Every structure is written in C-alpha cells, then in structure tokens.
Amino acid sequence: MLDAAIKALAQMFSPPFRSVLLKAVALALALLVVVGIALHRLLVWLVDAGGAWLETGAGPHAHGPVGALEWVLAILAGFGLIAGAVFLMPAVTSLVASFFVDEIAEQVEKSYYPADPPGTVVPLGRAILEGVKAALLAFLVYVGALPFVLVAGLGVVIFFFANAYLLGRVYFELAAMRFHSPTEAKRLRRLHQPTVFAGGMFIAAFVSIPIVSLATPLFGTAFMVHLHKRLAPRPEPATQSA
C-alpha cells in the first residue's frame, strides 16, 4: 500500500498529469467559490433577519447594540466560511474526481500496467452521479460529526476517520468501475473494506494538507487504481491448444 502511495505521488509530477492537475484545481476552486458565495449570502440574510427581529422586539433604542452584534457575527461568519472550506474540501474533491477519473486512470494504467487489458471509460453521467452521491454523503456525515469538533481532539479524530471511509469508498469504486459494473465495484469494495479503509487513510491524510488538497483527485484516483489492481481478481491467461 505504501508502494501505491509512492507511485501515485511520483506520477503527479509527470507531464500528462500536469494538464489534468490544472483542470482539477480550477474546477475545485470554482466549486468552492460558488459554494462560498451561496453560504455567505445565506449567512448575511440570517444575520440581517435576526437583527431586524431583535430590533422589532427590543425597540428602536436597540439599533446600536444590534448593529454591533451584526458586525461581530459577520466577522465570525467570514472565519466560519474559511473553516467550512476545510470541511467541504473532501466532498468537493470527490465530485471533481468524477470528471477526471478516466484521464487519470488511463495514464496510470499505461505507465504501470501496459500488459494488462485497459479499463473502459466510465460514462460521465454515472461518474458524476457517484461523485454527487459521495459529496452529499460526506456533507451529511460531516454535519453529524460537527458537534464533536467542539470536544478537544475527538472531533479531529472523527473527521479524519470519516474522511478515510468516505474517500476510500468513492475513489476505489470509481477506479473499479473501469473494469466492473457499478454493482460489482461496490461488492468488491465491501469485500475488501478493511484494506480500502486503510487506503482511504492515505487519501484523508493528503486532503488534510492545505492547498495540496486541491490535487486530491489525482492522488486519490491514481492510488486507488494501484490498490484495485492488487485486490481485483486477475484474468486467467489464455491457454493454447495443442
């Protein structure tokens, strides 16, 4: 497994990967900006609505204190958006990976497994559907784990292991679907769940590094291509008749 991680990291600096890296980073940043703007608009609306409600209940003399409170909440909301980007990064990169899984996987297969039958292209609609499902599942899990973040140390541990499970799941299935049906890819992932989870820990560690995490689609996909090659049943060599 460490060998798979080293190979994935080494190939990220190859020329074919650079063009994919630029596209993946650009898409990830665009998604984060869109989500950030939407969340900012929502928070501003909540602060304004809450301030108006307080002024109505407390009377005109509360305008000054309420205005100061809105200003403080606006600053806190800004910091919250930055923290939210960290929480959203695994979900965003999972979605981004669905757009580039075939470009990345093809390069890995050509470089390291030229004698093996190549994988087939995952239909874009299917890949995006899996990416959206993974992103939504990640969001729900993170919302559930958010209360534990307030507990010193516990929230970080829960967040890391949740990432390991979710990222291992989505990247392995995307890599496996180049050789299996979606149902078989999921069955193979469940069959090797402990190993896939351990592989997910490598990806979770990668995505936890600021800025570098934008390249998670490349590392995660390449890593799981190697892991799938190790875990999937290999085709029997053809026998020649006498």
Image (cartoon, grey):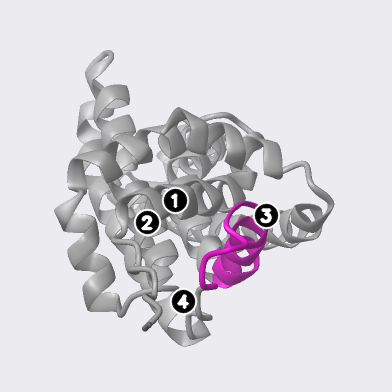
Q: Which residue is mark 4?
A: 128
Q: Amino acid at mark 4?
A: Ile
Q: Earlier in the sequence, mark 1 or mark 4?
A: 4
Say which label, 4 or 3, has the lower sequence index.
Answer: 3
Q: Give the crowd class for mark 1: few <14, some 14-19, many >=20 residues within 10 Å.
A: many
Residue marked by disc 2: 172
> In the rendered image, which quarter is residue 174 located in?
bottom left
Residue pointed to by mark 1:
224
Task: Report the Cα–Cα distance between label 1 and label 4.
Answer: 18 Å
Q: Of helix, strand and loop, which mostly describes the magenta segment?
A: helix
Report the Cα–Cα distance between label 1 and label 3. 15 Å
User: Is residue 44 positioned above or below 63 on the image?
Assistant: below
Magenta residues? 99-118
Residue behind mark 3? 111
Rendered residue at 28%/59% (across/down): 137
**Image quarter of residue 24:** bottom right
What's the distance in space between the residues labelled 2 and 4, CA to CA? 15 Å
> At 56% across and 53% down in the image, what residue appears?
217
**Residue at the (36%, 33%) spot, across then down:** 201
Q: Secondary structure at mark 4?
A: helix
Q: Amino acid at mark 3?
A: Ser
The N terminus appears in which quarter of the rendering? top left
Which of the two marks, 4 or 3, is nearer to us in this view? Answer: 3
Look at the image and say whether residue 113 sits in the magenta stretch: yes
Q: Are marks 2 and 1 in contact (CB under 8 Å)?
A: yes
Q: Please indicate whether residue 87 sits to the left or right of residue 197 in the image.
A: right
Q: CA distance from mark 2 to mark 1?
A: 5 Å
In the image, residue 144 lies at what x, y percent? Answer: 20, 45
- Residue 120: in magenta span: no
Amino acid bearing label 2: Phe
Which is in the foreground here, disc 1 or disc 4?
A: 1
Location of residue 60 with respect to 79 vertically, above or below: below
